[in-house]
Structures are given as C-alpha cells and as structure tokens.
Amino acid sequence: MIAIILNKTPEERISEIVHHIEKHDVKAHISRGVDRTVIGIVGNAGPVLAEQLRQLSGVEQVVKISKSYKLASRDFHPDPTIIQLKGVEIGGDQLVVMGGPCAVESPEQIDEIARLVKASGAQVLRGGAFKPRTGPYSFQGVGVEGLVMMAEAGRKHGLLTITEVMTPEYVDVCAEYADILQVGTRNMQNFDLLRKLGQIQTPVLLKRGFSATYDEFLNAAEYILAGGNPNVMLCERGIRTFESYTRNTLDLAAIPVLQSLSHLPVISDPSHGTGRRELVEPMSKASVAAGANGLIVEMHTDPDNSMTGDGVQSLFPDQFARLMQDLEKLAPLCGKRFDTVKEPVAAVNS
Amino acid sequence: MIAIILNKTPEERISEIVHHIEKHDVKAHISRGVDRTVIGIVGNAGPVLAEQLRQLSGVEQVVKISKSYKLASRDFHPDPTIIQLKGVEIGGDQLVVMGGPCAVESPEQIDEIARLVKASGAQVLRGGAFKPRTGPYSFQGVGVEGLVMMAEAGRKHGLLTITEVMTPEYVDVCAEYADILQVGTRNMQNFDLLRKLGQIQTPVLLKRGFSATYDEFLNAAEYILAGGNPNVMLCERGIRTFESYTRNTLDLAAIPVLQSLSHLPVISDPSHGTGRRELVEPMSKASVAAGANGLIVEMHTDPDNSMTGDGVQSLFPDQFARLMQDLEKLAPLCGKRFDTVKEPVAAVNS
Amino acid sequence: MIAIILNKTPEERISEIVHHIEKHDVKAHISRGVDRTVIGIVGNAGPVLAEQLRQLSGVEQVVKISKSYKLASRDFHPDPTIIQLKGVEIGGDQLVVMGGPCAVESPEQIDEIARLVKASGAQVLRGGAFKPRTGPYSFQGVGVEGLVMMAEAGRKHGLLTITEVMTPEYVDVCAEYADILQVGTRNMQNFDLLRKLGQIQTPVLLKRGFSATYDEFLNAAEYILAGGNPNVMLCERGIRTFESYTRNTLDLAAIPVLQSLSHLPVISDPSHGTGRRELVEPMSKASVAAGANGLIVEMHTDPDNSMTGDGVQSLFPDQFARLMQDLEKLAPLCGKRFDTVKEPVAAVNS
Amino acid sequence: MIAIILNKTPEERISEIVHHIEKHDVKAHISRGVDRTVIGIVGNAGPVLAEQLRQLSGVEQVVKISKSYKLASRDFHPDPTIIQLKGVEIGGDQLVVMGGPCAVESPEQIDEIARLVKASGAQVLRGGAFKPRTGPYSFQGVGVEGLVMMAEAGRKHGLLTITEVMTPEYVDVCAEYADILQVGTRNMQNFDLLRKLGQIQTPVLLKRGFSATYDEFLNAAEYILAGGNPNVMLCERGIRTFESYTRNTLDLAAIPVLQSLSHLPVISDPSHGTGRRELVEPMSKASVAAGANGLIVEMHTDPDNSMTGDGVQSLFPDQFARLMQDLEKLAPLCGKRFDTVKEPVAAVNS
C-alpha cells in the first residue's frame, strides 16, 4: 500500500502522517520524487488503516500494490533511482562502464588493467577478490589482500571499484575497500547476505539468479531496500536455457522490463551473459540500444592465462578500447551521455 | 568436405573437377565468392575422393567440415549470402524491415496497413493468410483469398510481401502470390515442408523453433539448401524459457552467432520474441545493434480487435513510424544502410 | 459447453437434442460413459443455446468448459477412453508395452526383433519406416518397403504394429499397413497432419512436443478428436531442459496430470525420454508406478550398429526380457493387469 | 587421483602410504569398502607422486579421476555410502521416509503431526524453523524456538528430525537440536554454508538447486565432503522448466544417474517437485520405483491454514497414512526394506 501525498504538503504534515501510519505496527518509507512524494507502507496494513489514511489531510490517494515487492516497485517510486557516487551517476542519463578482470591476481596485474580501463574512458574497475567456484578445488580468489590491491589501483587511476561479496561476514571489510559491492548470481537468494547488505549504505549491484524470474529478482532487491539501503542496481547476466553454444542466454528484454516494473538502475553483463569473447561487443551495443544504464565487462591483459579460467570471455585491452569508442557514438542515440571521468576521482574512502 | 579452388582457375577446369566429383556418387555445390570459389561435396565422400581431389590441378585445398550442416556453413561459403529481390538486398548492408498485421483480415485492412508500412519507409509487407493455431477452434486465417488481397496491396503500394506457408501442398500457391515464404516456428522441423521449399527458388524466411538449438536451426536450413534453393534467411523469434512475463525470451546473441557459423541473412522478430508491444521498440533497436540484417515487426491499425488475438504485441501505426525514424539514425552506426524504397517496386510476378 | 444428459433418457430423445443443437451451427459430439451421457458442443455456442438446452427435457445440466480444448477434456468425457484393438485394451487396466527398433532396417532384422518382443510378452511392435532426422544427410528410413516388412513381422508373430507418419500424404499408406500411427515430437503442431489423422479411425499415438506445455499438448490432441477420430493416446517422451547428461528430461508428473485433465490413455517413452540405455529400466518402472497405461521402448539385436545411431538408448533383447518380467510383478501393485497376448492376434488388415 | 590398495594390506602399511602422500602437500581421504580400500588424493597431485605411488608396496593401482568432484564420485568410493543414524540406515536397503509440515508453527502443531508421522510408519520428522522466502515480508519461520519444539516432538514420538539451515552462523545451533540438516535449493551453491557443514559430522541433506546440473550438484556435495563430513545425502526436488502447471518438473532420472555417478544416498521430494497435493502419491511411488533411497514429504493437519502458504502441496494425514501403506507393498519389489521404527529411538542428543 502506498499513500500519495498532495503537492506542497509541508514536511511537518508529512511527518505527522508517517507517525500516524507507524502506530499501526507497519513501516513507512518516504520517497520524494520530482513530481510527488509517496509514502510506502510495508507490513500487514489492513483496510482500516487505508480508510483512515484516505481521510487524512495531505493524502491525495491511497493505492494498494498487489506485487509482492513494494519499495522496488515503480508504483512506489515513479522517478528512476540515481545513485551518485564520487561524480558518477548510475541510473540517470550517464552510461556507466565497469571493466576489469574476473579475479584480482597481483598488484601488477590489477594496476596495469586499471590503467587501461581508465585510458579507455570507463568509470569503474571490476575485479574479484573472493570467487564463488562450482568446485572446491578451483582457485577461490586471493582474499582480503585482493581488496587492498584493487582499492589502491582504483585510487591511483581515478576509478571507482566494484567487487563481489559472498557471505555476510565479509560485507564490512568489502565495503571498507570497494565503492560498490556485487552479489553474484548464485547468491541472489542468499537472504542473510541480502539482509546484511540492507544495513549499510554502500551501493549494491545485485546479479539476477541464472534461473530467476523478474519477480524473484525484484523481491531479492526488496530484501536490501527493506533493510534501509536504497542504493541497489540490478544486473542482467544471462539465464540458463537449453542452448549450450553460449554459456548463458543474455535476456536483453529484461532491461526495459525491469526499468518499467522498477525504478532501479539496470546494468548488463555481456561477458557472463554469453561466455564468449567474440559476442561481447555486439551484445554490449545491443544492451545499450535496449536502454541499459551501464555495462560490466571482463577485460584482461593475458586472458589465456587468467587464474579463473574465465579468460575465454574476457576482452583483450585493444578490443575493450574499441568497444568504448563505439559506445561513445552509440550512447547519444540511445538517450545516454557518455562521460569519461576526466579528473581523477577522490581517493577511496578518504 | 569442401574443395577450395585456386584463384583464376578457368570455368572449364572447374566443370571438369565437378564432373570428377560426381562420379563418386556425391553431389557438388559450387559457391563463387569474391575471393575464392569453393565446391561443397555433400554425401558420403570417403578419403579416396579427398586424396584424388588434392592432386587435381586447380584444387588448392581440401577441407573436411565436421559440422552436420555443410551448405549452410561459413566454411563452405565464406561471403555472406545476399538475396536480391526487386531492388531490395537482404543479407548485405541494407537494413530490411518487414511490417504488417499478424493476419490478413480484409482487403481494406491490408490496403490501409500497406499504405502505412510504405509511408514509414519499410520495404516488405507481412501478413498471414494461413495461421498455425494452438487450438482447432481459433481463427485459422482467411486462406487463399488472403494471398490475393496481400499481393494486391503489395503491388499497389510498392512493397515486397511475405506470408507463412504451413504445408507442402500450399507451397506453390503461396509462391505464386508472395515474394518471400515464411516457415513458422512450429514447422522448423517439418521436413517434408522444408524439402518442398528446396525445390523452388522463392526466398524463404525460416523461423527458429522455439526450443531449437543453433545446430538444429542450421540443419533445418540445410534441408532447403540441399534441395537446391539457396535463398534462405534465418529468423530469431524468441525461445521458450521459464520466464512467463514475456511470451518468449528473444535470444539476441543468436544474431552474431548465426552470422559467424553461417553466411545466411539473419532477421529478428521482436514482436513474437517478446509478445508485448512496449518491448518491441527497445528490442528492435537492440537487434540492429547486435547486427541483424532486418526486422519483422507486427503493426495493426486496430490491434485490440485483431482476429488472432495477437494484437497485444502489435505496434500502432504511429509507434511503427517512430521506430522507423529511430532505426534510420541507428543503422549507420551499426554498419547498415537504411534505404527506403522510394520508387514503386515492379508489380508482383509481372 | 457440454450438456449432461439425464440417466435413462431414451436414444431417440438424445437424437432430438443433438438435432436441436446442430440447428445452431455448432457441432455435437456424443460421449457415452458408464454413468452418464454427455453431449459436447463445439463451435461458437452462445448463451441463447445454453439457455434453451437447460430447458429441454432430458438435459440434466449445461456446463461451460473454459479450457481451450473440449473433446480432450475430462469434463466432457468423465470415463477414461479405452481403445480396443484386436484384443488389446489401451487406456484401461491393461498395461501395454510397445517394443522394437528405432528403424526398420531389413526383413530379417524386424522379424528377429518381433520374435523377441513377442517372446518377452509385449503386445505391440514398434519400428520406423520414415524417420524424421535433424539433418538432411542422415539415414531417412527405408520408406514404404519398411511398412511392408513390419506388417509381415507383426502378422507372423501375433503383434500389433505402430509406426511414425510424418506428412499428410503418407497417412493412408501408413494406416493400410500399421495398427497404430505415431506422430513424432517435432510434428506435434503440424496441424495439417493432425487434421488428416482426424479423418481416419486408426488409433494415433501423439508424442508431446519436446517443449510443449500440457495445454498445447491437449490442444494438439483436440485437432485429431475434433476431426472425428476418437482413438488418440498421449505419449510423454521427455522435455528439453538445461540438463545435457540425459537427452531429455522425462516428465513423469505429466502422466497423472494428463490423466486428470483428459480421458485419453497416457504412454511413456523412457528411451527417448532419457537417451541412455541404463536409465530405461528404472524409468520404465517409475512410469508404471506413476500410472502410465503403457510404455514404448526401443530394443535392438545389435544396437551398436543401428542405422539411426540411436542404439545408445536401445535395450539389448535380454534386458528387454528382464524388464518385462519386472513389470509383470509391478503392474498389479499399480492397478494394472499384465496380459501377454497368448494367442496370435488376427492377421493385420485381413 | 585415487590409489587402490591391495587386499589384505595391513593398516600400518596403509598409514605409511597416507603419510607418504601427505608429504606432497595434498590431502588423503581413506575409503574402506567391502571389497577394497581406496585412498583419494585431493589437491595438485602431479605425475611425480603418481609414479612414486605406483611403486609403493601395498598399492595395486593409481587412477586419475577426470571429474571435477572426487570424493563424491563412485570411482573413489565404489560401495554406496550408508549413513547410520540411531537405528535408521540411509543409503542402504532401507526405504526412509521423512514427513512433516513445511514450517514448525507451534508446539501443539508439531507434536500432533509427529504423532501422525510416527503412526504411519515413517522414521524422520521434517519441519522448518528458519524459512527461505522469496520476499522479505513473508513469514520467515519461528526461529530457534522452532528447533526446540521439533526436537521435543521427535524425542517424544521416537522420530529422527531434519530441519533447514540457511546460514553458516546457525549451523551449530541447528546441529544441536536436529539429527539431519537440510540445505535448501537456493543455497546449493552458498559455498560458505557448505564449507561450514563440512566441519561437523551431522548428516546433511543437500537439495539440488532448481536449475543445477548433476555435475554442479555433485560439486556442491564435494564442498561438504572435502571439508571432512562424509554424511551427505542428495535430494532431487524438481527443476525449473517452461511448464507452469506444476511448480517444478521432478527429474526422476536424476535418481539412477546420481546413484551411478556417486555413492551418496538419493532422496526424492515429490512435494516441492510438483507443488500439487494430488501428484505427491504417484510421484512418491515413481520415485521408489526409480530407486530412491528415501522420500521427504510434506504433511499437515490443516494445510489450508499453513503459515507458509505451501499447504497446497501438503498431504492430509490420512493421505500420508495411505501412501505409507502403498509404499510398504511397493518397496520389496524395488529392492528396499520398509522398516517402521517399532521401538522408540533414543532421546535426541542424550
């Protein structure tokens, strides 16, 4: 249930309405859009509360939301969410590109890749310090040291950083070193992890489970939002189908669908979405044409010797650079700005 | 197995090589590319023939093709197939758009839609006279009369026409009236229909079965090619997945994949691929960005009252017109020309 | 819409009711069950007819059926359909087993296999004369000759026969030689083929499309029933999923689901449903435990050299014999009789 | 890599071999089968170690295992794993049934259901205290209190207990109260949870991820085994497909496949596998016929008012009792004993 507030209702009155709502043992979330303010009511709000609200001065309308997710819904938050992060805007007109290796391997590796990512005009450095691996004997990432290496490379080259967090215990340390935390496809319904991420304010990139429906995906985002962290972006990274030529089937219709059902930014991952290097460029362009707010792309200086064996889907640096040039031309036709971060961003966490 | 012919080998010598091949109880298909001529050998060509061929003058190289399809393969035919049709080029640089209703309903309906399709700059009029329907009590199309109506509308407005053929018996009559014949998703492995289409020269748009792999898709095309009809285009129209919000999941990676495995033109169908009108525009753009040679898009003047009940995925005429304007800007960035057919094309079959 | 007739209504009165119905430009199908007679009304039956029917003497109740299939529905035909075929009952208490090779290869091969099928206690000989193959260069079956060979083997060993028909043109010749016609998974929505099969009375085993929903499957059966052929059996043969260890995922829940939605017999195909010989025995037993009316199982005397390359899913004769012994014990616990056909069945078509 | 030990090699010699192996910086796991003892070597065992081992006295053979999972493989452990638990044998000839509600709701509810589960002859009481829910506003389980209620009901009625654990932090408390810990489908690749479960000895029932391949499933089990906990059972609970009539598609072929690839017991969950009460009985029987070592079945005294809304797939008590009677007859035909636990099992953790 949401209550739509009359234009020009004073803040004081809104507080009174919130106070009234919370007497009913439910939670109120205020969303201030350009055009209107909306109060989302989460919990077992019965018809009695709805009726009372309708009669309060300042309340224009009370609308029942039948979807199981509330805060993630466009109904509740009609304007798009724009996450402001050290001069980068995710979710608005800016096209944001996150590039880097599957895994952080050494200080030299991540520093060199950061330099190339920056030189190509991308804004965010990606890299995994903790890796979720199908089998227990595969390389599991270099751990906390990797976080340090990546933060340093990001700081030096003026890039934001994103890294995956796999378990609630590591949320705090990852948030200390990285600008954005990523939840991997296998953890989309790791509800304790989602709850923990709801308790911080660090932006979260939530990857779609490889067989998750849109509804389940938005409910997973709702766990984070309901905890109090509004900085969530959704990432389409391919779903599992019968086709085995590609690693996954990148579902690009998810981009406009999620943007209509939700106000959260939508990022596309053509690397995992296809699993094949030669498909990253066409699928990157197609993602932007479908309206994506950004891309997350694997790039490696020596893909054939990457430690995770995911090199087959990583671009070579020159391919990444060419892709960025193409995107710069394509973006304006798709309603997006392509701002490279010309000035070094501020040092991380300083 | 293919035999690659030395540059500048005289035609006469090529004929002798073909003659030699055919003594071995196999078929030879000649493909003349810009750079080289290739002879495809189809049938049980054993190592003896391979060895003999290697020693013939004029033969540069003999290569075994391990794929189950041969004529559809890029190995056999390195240059893209370009289908020339009354001034329209399908498979080359030209972006081709096919628009129109799900079903032909009346002379007035198809005439008015043809006028709008033409005015928007598309080159081909689509419309079904025979409709494959899940249940026997649904509207099954108006039949042969519909072919006549559509041919007349196409002729009048200077548009090529495409229509679906469902059974071998109707191939000839459909080919009499339409410029392109469509094989629907449920008939992708109707092998008798494919064999019959191999016996004519009318271009065929073959839709991917909704759960067909790329390999099965190209093998279905091979049936038509092996029969002797080289004019085949492939159409990605969405695959069946667990997601039910959209009617199908449009697999845009299929576009670059099919273009790399095969030389045949690839058309995208965002209408059936999503089943939702509001997704047709973003998925059309994404298709072009992914490299599609063309689009097939449903448009109806009164979608809510369409006879097939497919109106929910049909664009309104003004939406179609706007889409065409957007595509005109997008095409050059994706390596495609956007030529509207300014002059009326010649009358159909005259 | 169906009209349920009062018990003990005389035949003459029922004819009058049918006559009344058909004045409304719809079709009436009579279904005589043990407990009650039901008239199915197919076509655009409006509320006027419904109201009139309710008032006719002899009509107990008029019920709207909201499913898109009518004649295939349990609502219309509450008792199970039992197909009587030369002493074998398909759809009742008898467990029916169809065994034989993927393809008829020679008179000797099919004769020897028929002998073994008979000796093991099965009632029906399976074998393909026309084979649907993914690629055009694979073995396509021996054709009409194969029909003759199989009919002869069936006659000699006292077995019913089943064979696949792929195209409307071959329906008549296949029906001349075989007792049951099979529609393959790729042809489940070959509507012209289904319509043609509706015009004969030969029993049809309709295989589920490898990505067909239950609803689509029953609508495909409806095409045959609506044409006038009531002798349809449904065959679950595995669906396509992401799992590639097995050729398909055999959906055994389909058995009780289809038996509750429909009155038609349900046969299970563990050979195609798994694609692996070692899984045929456990899946056969599981099918019977799930309530299947019968099984269709591939058996070959020399599977490694079968002409279709499907030998990997064919049982050896001794495995087939052991399976039959196990089924004989299992059947009574699952509410089924296991009658081997002790006496030779009458010669085919004599 | 595994080293197969010569028959009658004394324990002392085996210890020496293990000692030799572990000098190479790898782990050795001993598996003592009826026929032979096998030492599994996990880690980067190079060709040097292989060569040395081959020459050690007591080593019969050294075999490389190419699968990514080792300890879960039949190659390593040829005999089936049998988990002995207070007189119940899981993985051998005994058919084990786990019954109970989706969620523990109150002491009275779980006590009454435990009484009925016991009276029907099942050996294990199931019930969730912590519930993984798609959305954050759904009932999330009663928590630790629920563990206490269930342990008390199990003790009183002489039943083993199984409950789900969702996060590493709760493993210890769950293991204190329950006999078996369940990992849910969404957590199959929650690798930190799996690692934690590898550090205890409490048996774990690992549910297959709803889109996991067999290979991924066995690799997830490998995480637990590699940690040192050999007591793992695998649970097939349905996979996600395009069919939406059933909640999931129960993949019964998984039972014989997993039993051939692995030595671990395989349990079937027809309740989640179908999501429909009326399908639980046929799918339970089919599971046993396919060779399942046990079943986990939802039963509730008041399904329509269950707190999770999962009542639609829960059996009524009388249905559960009838199912148990049917299974008692079916089990011997499928190579299984059906022992009800006649005597009260010992009190939990006493």
Image (cartoon, coloured by chain):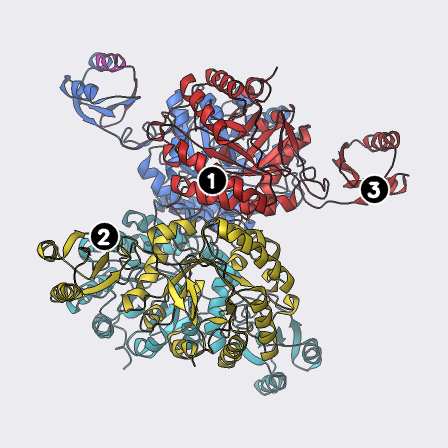
Chain colours: A blue, B cyan, C yellow, D red
The residue where tag 1 is placed is D270
A205 lies left or right of B108? right
Q: Please tell me which residue lies in front, D306 or D143.
A: D306
Q: Secondary structure at mark 2?
A: loop
Earlier-in-chain disc, 3 versus 1: 3
Circle 3 sits on which residue?
A: D50
Sort mark 1 into few (<14), some (14-19) or many (20+) by Cα contacts within 10 Å: many
The chain identifier of the residue carrying mark 3 reads D
Residue in view at x 25 percent, y 77 percent: B347
**Looking at the picture, which amino acid does disc 2 mark?**
Ile
**Any part of residue C84 in sight:** yes
- Labels 3 and 1 in the same subunit: yes
Q: Are marks 2 and 1 on the same chain?
A: no
Residue A19, magenta (yes or no): yes
Please provide percent x and percent y for residue C147: 49, 78
Residue kind at label 1, given as amino acid type = Pro
Q: Chain of mark 2?
A: C
Q: Amino acid at mark 3?
A: Ala
Q: Nearer the viewer, residue A149 or A118?
A: A149
Q: Residues within 10 Å of mark 2 (few under 14, many from 20)?
A: some
* Camera-nearest label, 3 or 1: 1
Residue range of the region highlighted in magenta in the rendering = A16-36
| Image quadrant occupied by the N terminus of chain A | top left
**Please, what secondary structure does the residue beneath circle 1 have?**
helix
Residue A278 in the figure: left or right of residue B129: right
Image position of A130 (left or right of B48): left
Corner quadrant of residue A65:
top left
Q: Is residue B198 magenta?
A: no
Can you identify the residue that label 2 sits on? C65
- Per the model, the C-alpha gap separating discs 3 and 1 is 44 Å
